[in-house]
Amino acid sequence: MKFFTDREICYADILPPSEVRARIEVAVLNFLKILTCADPAISDLLLINRKSSNRRVSQGLLTDDDTWIFLSRSFCKRSLMRANAAKAFIRVWKVMEMCFKILLQEKWVTQRELFYKLLCVSPDCFSSQLQVNRTIQDVVSLLRCSRFSLGIMASSRGIVAGRLLVQEPDKEMVDCSECGSSGYAISGDLNLLDRLVMKTDARYIIIVEKHAIFQRLAEDRVFNHIPIILITARGYPDIATRFLLHRMSRTFPELPIMALVDWNPAGLAILCTFKFGSIGMGLEAYRYACNVKWLGLRGDDLQLIPEESFVSLKPRDLQIAKSLMSSETLQEKHREELALMVQSGKRAEIEALYFHGYDYLGKYIAKKIVQANYI
Protein backbone atom coordinates (compact mmCIF):
# COMPACT_ATOMS: atom_id res chain seq x y z
CA MET A 1 0.00 0.00 0.00
CA LYS A 2 1.90 3.05 -1.21
CA PHE A 3 1.61 6.60 0.10
CA PHE A 4 2.35 8.93 -2.81
CA THR A 5 5.73 7.75 -4.15
CA ASP A 6 8.23 7.42 -1.33
CA ARG A 7 6.52 6.08 1.77
CA GLU A 8 4.71 2.92 2.64
CA ILE A 9 1.80 3.04 5.04
CA CYS A 10 1.90 0.27 7.62
CA TYR A 11 -1.56 -0.73 8.75
CA ALA A 12 -3.38 -3.47 10.65
CA ASP A 13 -5.99 -5.56 8.85
CA ILE A 14 -9.41 -6.54 10.13
CA LEU A 15 -9.25 -10.31 9.85
CA PRO A 16 -11.50 -13.31 10.60
CA PRO A 17 -10.43 -15.49 13.56
CA SER A 18 -9.18 -18.29 11.28
CA GLU A 19 -6.76 -15.92 9.52
CA VAL A 20 -5.45 -14.50 12.80
CA ARG A 21 -4.90 -18.01 14.16
CA ALA A 22 -3.06 -18.87 10.94
CA ARG A 23 -0.75 -15.86 11.36
CA ILE A 24 0.00 -16.87 14.96
CA GLU A 25 0.77 -20.43 13.81
CA VAL A 26 3.12 -19.12 11.10
CA ALA A 27 4.93 -16.96 13.68
CA VAL A 28 5.38 -20.01 15.93
CA LEU A 29 6.56 -22.24 13.05
CA ASN A 30 9.07 -19.65 11.86
CA PHE A 31 10.43 -19.33 15.39
CA LEU A 32 10.77 -23.12 15.74
CA LYS A 33 12.33 -23.47 12.28
CA ILE A 34 15.19 -21.12 13.20
CA LEU A 35 15.52 -22.70 16.64
CA THR A 36 15.88 -26.24 15.23
CA CYS A 37 18.01 -25.54 12.15
CA ALA A 38 21.68 -26.63 11.75
CA ASP A 39 22.82 -23.32 13.21
CA PRO A 40 20.11 -22.77 15.87
CA ALA A 41 19.27 -19.33 17.16
CA ILE A 42 16.48 -17.47 18.89
CA SER A 43 15.05 -15.04 16.36
CA ASP A 44 14.21 -11.47 17.27
CA LEU A 45 10.68 -10.17 16.81
CA LEU A 46 10.56 -7.33 14.29
CA LEU A 47 7.81 -4.83 15.16
CA ILE A 48 6.72 -1.61 13.54
CA ASN A 49 8.27 1.25 15.50
CA ARG A 50 5.52 3.13 17.39
CA LYS A 51 7.72 6.02 18.55
CA SER A 52 6.97 9.59 17.50
CA SER A 53 10.06 9.54 15.26
CA ASN A 54 8.25 7.04 13.01
CA ARG A 55 5.03 9.07 12.92
CA ARG A 56 3.91 10.42 9.56
CA VAL A 57 0.85 12.43 8.59
CA SER A 58 -1.34 11.70 5.61
CA GLN A 59 -2.74 14.75 3.84
CA GLY A 60 -5.75 14.91 1.54
CA LEU A 61 -4.79 15.93 -1.97
CA LEU A 62 -7.30 18.80 -2.08
CA THR A 63 -8.12 19.52 1.58
CA ASP A 64 -6.92 18.69 5.09
CA ASP A 65 -10.25 17.01 5.89
CA ASP A 66 -8.90 13.49 5.49
CA THR A 67 -5.78 13.71 7.63
CA TRP A 68 -4.55 11.07 10.01
CA ILE A 69 -1.46 9.70 11.70
CA PHE A 70 0.20 6.63 10.25
CA LEU A 71 3.40 4.70 10.85
CA SER A 72 5.99 4.16 8.15
CA ARG A 73 8.10 1.05 7.60
CA SER A 74 10.62 1.42 10.39
CA PHE A 75 11.24 -1.47 12.76
CA CYS A 76 12.21 -2.06 16.37
CA LYS A 77 13.12 -5.39 17.96
CA ARG A 78 12.03 -7.52 20.86
CA SER A 79 14.96 -9.79 21.69
CA LEU A 80 15.36 -12.56 24.28
CA MET A 81 19.12 -12.02 24.21
CA ARG A 82 18.99 -8.43 25.48
CA ALA A 83 18.46 -8.11 29.21
CA ASN A 84 16.30 -5.00 28.97
CA ALA A 85 14.02 -6.54 26.31
CA ALA A 86 13.83 -10.21 27.37
CA LYS A 87 10.60 -9.91 29.34
CA ALA A 88 8.95 -7.86 26.59
CA PHE A 89 9.91 -10.65 24.16
CA ILE A 90 8.27 -13.29 26.38
CA ARG A 91 5.16 -11.15 26.91
CA VAL A 92 4.50 -11.05 23.16
CA TRP A 93 4.37 -14.85 23.00
CA LYS A 94 2.23 -15.06 26.16
CA VAL A 95 -0.34 -12.63 24.75
CA MET A 96 -0.36 -14.41 21.38
CA GLU A 97 -0.95 -17.72 23.17
CA MET A 98 -3.85 -16.24 25.12
CA CYS A 99 -5.38 -14.63 22.00
CA PHE A 100 -5.10 -17.95 20.13
CA LYS A 101 -7.10 -19.67 22.89
CA ILE A 102 -9.68 -16.85 22.96
CA LEU A 103 -10.19 -17.08 19.20
CA LEU A 104 -10.49 -20.88 19.34
CA GLN A 105 -13.25 -20.53 21.93
CA GLU A 106 -14.91 -17.77 19.86
CA LYS A 107 -14.87 -15.50 22.91
CA TRP A 108 -14.16 -11.79 23.43
CA VAL A 109 -12.26 -10.23 26.33
CA THR A 110 -11.52 -6.67 27.40
CA GLN A 111 -7.97 -5.50 28.04
CA ARG A 112 -8.75 -5.52 31.76
CA GLU A 113 -9.98 -9.12 31.67
CA LEU A 114 -6.90 -10.13 29.71
CA PHE A 115 -4.65 -8.47 32.29
CA TYR A 116 -6.12 -10.45 35.18
CA LYS A 117 -5.95 -13.69 33.22
CA LEU A 118 -2.27 -13.10 32.39
CA LEU A 119 -1.57 -11.98 35.96
CA CYS A 120 -2.83 -15.35 37.19
CA VAL A 121 -1.04 -17.58 34.66
CA SER A 122 2.16 -15.54 34.17
CA PRO A 123 2.72 -13.36 37.26
CA ASP A 124 6.48 -13.17 36.60
CA CYS A 125 5.87 -11.51 33.22
CA PHE A 126 2.93 -9.20 33.87
CA SER A 127 2.56 -6.83 36.80
CA SER A 128 0.57 -3.92 35.36
CA GLN A 129 -2.20 -3.09 32.91
CA LEU A 130 0.21 -0.85 30.99
CA GLN A 131 2.45 -3.83 30.23
CA VAL A 132 -0.51 -5.73 28.81
CA ASN A 133 -1.69 -2.75 26.76
CA ARG A 134 1.75 -2.23 25.25
CA THR A 135 2.18 -5.93 24.52
CA ILE A 136 -1.18 -6.04 22.74
CA GLN A 137 0.10 -3.28 20.44
CA ASP A 138 3.30 -5.31 19.94
CA VAL A 139 1.17 -8.25 18.79
CA VAL A 140 -0.88 -5.99 16.51
CA SER A 141 2.41 -4.74 15.05
CA LEU A 142 3.82 -8.25 14.61
CA LEU A 143 0.73 -9.88 13.08
CA ARG A 144 -0.55 -6.75 11.28
CA CYS A 145 -4.11 -7.35 12.43
CA SER A 146 -6.38 -5.08 14.46
CA ARG A 147 -6.76 -5.41 18.20
CA PHE A 148 -10.39 -6.39 17.71
CA SER A 149 -9.31 -9.17 15.32
CA LEU A 150 -7.30 -10.64 18.21
CA GLY A 151 -10.52 -11.11 20.19
CA ILE A 152 -9.87 -8.08 22.39
CA MET A 153 -12.96 -5.94 22.83
CA ALA A 154 -12.91 -2.23 23.54
CA SER A 155 -14.08 -1.06 26.97
CA SER A 156 -16.45 1.73 26.09
CA ARG A 157 -17.32 4.73 28.23
CA GLY A 158 -19.06 6.53 25.40
CA ILE A 159 -22.70 7.63 25.20
CA VAL A 160 -24.86 9.35 22.58
CA ALA A 161 -27.93 11.59 22.83
CA GLY A 162 -29.93 13.78 20.51
CA ARG A 163 -31.38 13.40 17.05
CA LEU A 164 -30.19 9.93 16.20
CA LEU A 165 -32.12 6.69 15.70
CA VAL A 166 -30.06 3.51 16.13
CA GLN A 167 -31.04 -0.07 15.58
CA GLU A 168 -28.95 -3.04 16.63
CA PRO A 169 -29.35 -6.32 14.70
CA ASP A 170 -32.66 -8.07 15.54
CA LYS A 171 -33.67 -5.31 17.95
CA GLU A 172 -36.07 -2.38 17.92
CA MET A 173 -35.05 1.11 16.88
CA VAL A 174 -33.83 3.32 19.75
CA ASP A 175 -34.48 7.07 19.74
CA CYS A 176 -31.42 8.65 21.39
CA SER A 177 -33.39 11.84 22.10
CA GLU A 178 -35.53 9.82 24.52
CA CYS A 179 -32.66 8.21 26.48
CA GLY A 180 -32.53 11.00 29.04
CA SER A 181 -29.34 12.48 30.45
CA SER A 182 -27.77 9.00 30.67
CA GLY A 183 -27.83 8.70 26.87
CA TYR A 184 -27.50 5.62 24.68
CA ALA A 185 -24.52 3.52 25.82
CA ILE A 186 -22.00 2.77 23.07
CA SER A 187 -21.14 -0.94 22.93
CA GLY A 188 -17.53 -2.09 23.05
CA ASP A 189 -18.34 -4.67 20.35
CA LEU A 190 -16.99 -3.10 17.14
CA ASN A 191 -18.76 -5.74 15.02
CA LEU A 192 -22.05 -4.63 16.53
CA LEU A 193 -21.24 -0.95 15.99
CA ASP A 194 -20.36 -1.72 12.38
CA ARG A 195 -23.81 -3.27 11.84
CA LEU A 196 -25.85 -0.51 13.48
CA VAL A 197 -28.59 1.00 11.33
CA MET A 198 -28.55 4.76 11.92
CA LYS A 199 -30.92 7.51 10.84
CA THR A 200 -30.89 11.23 11.66
CA ASP A 201 -32.37 14.60 10.82
CA ALA A 202 -29.55 16.39 12.65
CA ARG A 203 -27.34 18.94 10.94
CA TYR A 204 -24.35 18.81 13.28
CA ILE A 205 -22.50 16.36 15.52
CA ILE A 206 -21.06 17.76 18.77
CA ILE A 207 -18.30 15.95 20.67
CA VAL A 208 -18.50 16.90 24.35
CA GLU A 209 -15.37 16.36 26.41
CA LYS A 210 -17.05 16.06 29.81
CA HIS A 211 -19.78 13.74 30.98
CA ALA A 212 -21.30 16.39 33.28
CA ILE A 213 -21.58 18.88 30.39
CA PHE A 214 -23.10 16.17 28.20
CA GLN A 215 -25.67 15.43 30.91
CA ARG A 216 -26.55 19.12 31.25
CA LEU A 217 -27.08 19.50 27.49
CA ALA A 218 -29.12 16.28 27.27
CA GLU A 219 -31.18 17.20 30.33
CA ASP A 220 -31.93 20.60 28.82
CA ARG A 221 -32.82 18.81 25.55
CA VAL A 222 -30.71 21.31 23.65
CA PHE A 223 -31.15 19.12 20.54
CA ASN A 224 -34.82 20.23 20.42
CA HIS A 225 -33.62 23.77 19.66
CA ILE A 226 -30.45 22.93 17.69
CA PRO A 227 -30.54 19.92 15.29
CA ILE A 228 -27.54 18.09 16.81
CA ILE A 229 -26.25 14.71 17.91
CA LEU A 230 -24.29 14.76 21.17
CA ILE A 231 -21.51 12.23 21.80
CA THR A 232 -19.00 11.94 24.64
CA ALA A 233 -16.26 9.53 25.66
CA ARG A 234 -16.24 11.08 29.17
CA GLY A 235 -12.71 12.37 28.74
CA TYR A 236 -9.93 10.83 26.66
CA PRO A 237 -11.60 8.94 23.80
CA ASP A 238 -11.83 5.16 23.84
CA ILE A 239 -11.71 3.06 20.67
CA ALA A 240 -15.43 2.23 20.58
CA THR A 241 -16.49 5.88 20.77
CA ARG A 242 -13.98 6.84 18.08
CA PHE A 243 -15.14 3.95 15.91
CA LEU A 244 -18.81 4.97 16.17
CA LEU A 245 -18.00 8.62 15.47
CA HIS A 246 -16.04 7.55 12.38
CA ARG A 247 -18.99 5.43 11.25
CA MET A 248 -21.33 8.37 11.73
CA SER A 249 -18.99 10.58 9.69
CA ARG A 250 -19.16 8.06 6.83
CA THR A 251 -22.91 7.44 7.15
CA PHE A 252 -23.72 11.16 7.37
CA PRO A 253 -20.84 12.82 5.46
CA GLU A 254 -22.73 16.10 5.18
CA LEU A 255 -22.79 16.64 8.97
CA PRO A 256 -19.95 18.80 10.37
CA ILE A 257 -18.34 17.37 13.51
CA MET A 258 -17.40 19.89 16.20
CA ALA A 259 -15.74 19.53 19.59
CA LEU A 260 -16.62 21.29 22.84
CA VAL A 261 -13.60 20.92 25.14
CA ASP A 262 -11.92 22.78 27.99
CA TRP A 263 -9.50 25.54 27.04
CA ASN A 264 -6.38 23.70 28.14
CA PRO A 265 -3.76 21.44 26.51
CA ALA A 266 -5.62 18.27 27.56
CA GLY A 267 -8.80 19.48 25.84
CA LEU A 268 -6.87 20.09 22.62
CA ALA A 269 -5.20 16.66 22.95
CA ILE A 270 -8.64 15.03 23.16
CA LEU A 271 -9.77 16.90 20.04
CA CYS A 272 -6.61 15.85 18.18
CA THR A 273 -7.09 12.19 19.10
CA PHE A 274 -10.58 12.24 17.59
CA LYS A 275 -9.28 14.11 14.55
CA PHE A 276 -5.98 12.37 13.77
CA GLY A 277 -5.76 9.21 15.87
CA SER A 278 -2.90 8.32 18.22
CA ILE A 279 0.71 7.18 17.75
CA GLY A 280 0.19 4.17 20.01
CA MET A 281 -2.47 2.86 17.63
CA GLY A 282 -0.88 4.27 14.49
CA LEU A 283 -1.48 1.02 12.59
CA GLU A 284 -5.23 1.53 12.98
CA ALA A 285 -5.53 5.34 13.20
CA TYR A 286 -7.08 5.75 9.74
CA ARG A 287 -9.98 3.56 10.86
CA TYR A 288 -11.03 5.98 13.60
CA ALA A 289 -9.96 9.46 12.41
CA CYS A 290 -12.60 12.12 11.62
CA ASN A 291 -12.58 15.70 10.40
CA VAL A 292 -13.29 17.49 13.70
CA LYS A 293 -13.65 21.25 14.02
CA TRP A 294 -12.90 23.15 17.25
CA LEU A 295 -16.10 24.81 18.42
CA GLY A 296 -14.94 25.91 21.87
CA LEU A 297 -13.67 26.86 24.33
CA ARG A 298 -11.20 29.01 22.44
CA GLY A 299 -9.27 32.21 22.95
CA ASP A 300 -12.06 34.45 21.65
CA ASP A 301 -14.37 33.03 24.36
CA LEU A 302 -12.17 34.13 27.26
CA GLN A 303 -13.96 37.47 27.48
CA LEU A 304 -17.08 35.50 28.51
CA ILE A 305 -15.32 34.01 31.54
CA PRO A 306 -14.85 35.87 34.85
CA GLU A 307 -11.23 36.25 35.95
CA GLU A 308 -11.89 34.25 39.12
CA SER A 309 -12.70 31.15 37.04
CA PHE A 310 -9.26 30.84 35.45
CA VAL A 311 -6.85 28.28 36.91
CA SER A 312 -3.07 28.22 36.53
CA LEU A 313 -1.59 25.63 34.19
CA LYS A 314 -0.10 22.63 35.96
CA PRO A 315 3.21 20.91 35.07
CA ARG A 316 1.19 18.14 33.40
CA ASP A 317 -0.53 20.76 31.20
CA LEU A 318 2.83 22.13 30.09
CA GLN A 319 4.07 18.63 29.34
CA ILE A 320 1.04 17.96 27.10
CA ALA A 321 1.49 21.37 25.44
CA LYS A 322 5.13 20.59 24.65
CA SER A 323 4.16 17.25 23.10
CA LEU A 324 1.44 18.87 20.98
CA MET A 325 3.76 21.65 19.81
CA SER A 326 6.22 19.05 18.52
CA SER A 327 3.50 17.31 16.50
CA GLU A 328 3.36 17.93 12.76
CA THR A 329 -0.37 17.18 12.85
CA LEU A 330 -1.20 20.36 14.74
CA GLN A 331 -2.85 22.97 12.53
CA GLU A 332 -1.60 26.54 12.62
CA LYS A 333 -4.72 27.96 14.29
CA HIS A 334 -4.61 25.21 16.89
CA ARG A 335 -0.95 25.97 17.47
CA GLU A 336 -1.79 29.65 18.02
CA GLU A 337 -4.44 28.72 20.61
CA LEU A 338 -1.97 26.45 22.39
CA ALA A 339 0.68 29.19 22.39
CA LEU A 340 -1.85 31.56 23.94
CA MET A 341 -2.58 29.05 26.72
CA VAL A 342 1.10 28.65 27.53
CA GLN A 343 1.79 32.39 27.30
CA SER A 344 -1.10 33.24 29.64
CA GLY A 345 -0.25 30.39 32.01
CA LYS A 346 -3.97 29.84 32.51
CA ARG A 347 -6.68 27.33 31.70
CA ALA A 348 -10.47 27.61 31.60
CA GLU A 349 -13.16 24.96 31.92
CA ILE A 350 -16.47 24.81 30.05
CA GLU A 351 -18.35 25.07 33.35
CA ALA A 352 -17.11 28.66 33.71
CA LEU A 353 -19.80 29.65 31.18
CA TYR A 354 -22.44 28.87 33.82
CA PHE A 355 -21.58 32.32 35.19
CA HIS A 356 -24.15 33.50 32.62
CA GLY A 357 -26.79 31.01 33.78
CA TYR A 358 -27.28 27.25 33.54
CA ASP A 359 -29.16 27.59 30.25
CA TYR A 360 -26.40 29.67 28.63
CA LEU A 361 -24.42 26.72 27.24
CA GLY A 362 -27.10 25.87 24.68
CA LYS A 363 -27.23 29.52 23.55
CA TYR A 364 -23.44 29.59 23.32
CA ILE A 365 -23.38 26.53 21.06
CA ALA A 366 -26.20 27.86 18.88
CA LYS A 367 -24.49 31.23 18.39
CA LYS A 368 -21.18 29.59 17.51
CA ILE A 369 -22.83 27.34 14.92
CA VAL A 370 -24.90 30.15 13.35
CA GLN A 371 -21.83 32.35 13.04
CA ALA A 372 -19.72 29.42 11.79
CA ASN A 373 -17.31 30.34 14.58
CA TYR A 374 -15.18 27.21 14.63
CA ILE A 375 -11.75 26.23 13.32
Image (cartoon, rainbow, N blue to C red):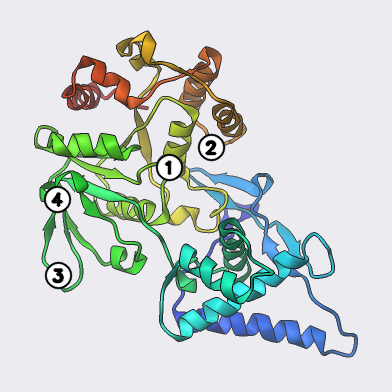
Label 4: element kind: loop
Pointer 4 residue = 179
Q: Earlier in the sequence, mark 1 or mark 2?
A: 1
Are circles 1 and 2 on residues that touch, CB within 8 Å? yes
Q: Residue at x 66, y 49 (%)?
A: 51
Label 2: element kind: loop
- Left or right, 353 with reference to 366: right
The kind of residue on which mark 1 rests is Lys
Report the disc number at residue 275: 1
Q: Residues within 10 Å of mark 4 (few under 14, many from 20)?
A: some
Q: Is residue 372 above or below residue 305?
A: below
State the separation of the CA atoms marked 3 and 2: 41 Å
Report the disc number at residue 329: 2
Q: Is residue 1 above or below residue 370?
A: below
Residue lying at the far right of the rendered structure:
39
Are circles 1 and 4 on residues that touch, CB within 8 Å? no
| Res 103 visible | yes
Q: Quadrant of residue 357?
A: top left
Q: Residue at x 69, y 86 (%)?
A: 29
The kind of residue on which mark 4 rests is Cys
State the separation of the CA atoms marked 1 and 2: 10 Å
The kind of residue on which mark 3 rests is Lys
Q: Is residue 230 above or below residue 103?
A: above
Q: Is residue 84 above or below residue 63?
A: below
State the separation of the CA atoms marked 4 and 2: 36 Å
- The quarter of the rendered structure image containing the C terminus is top left
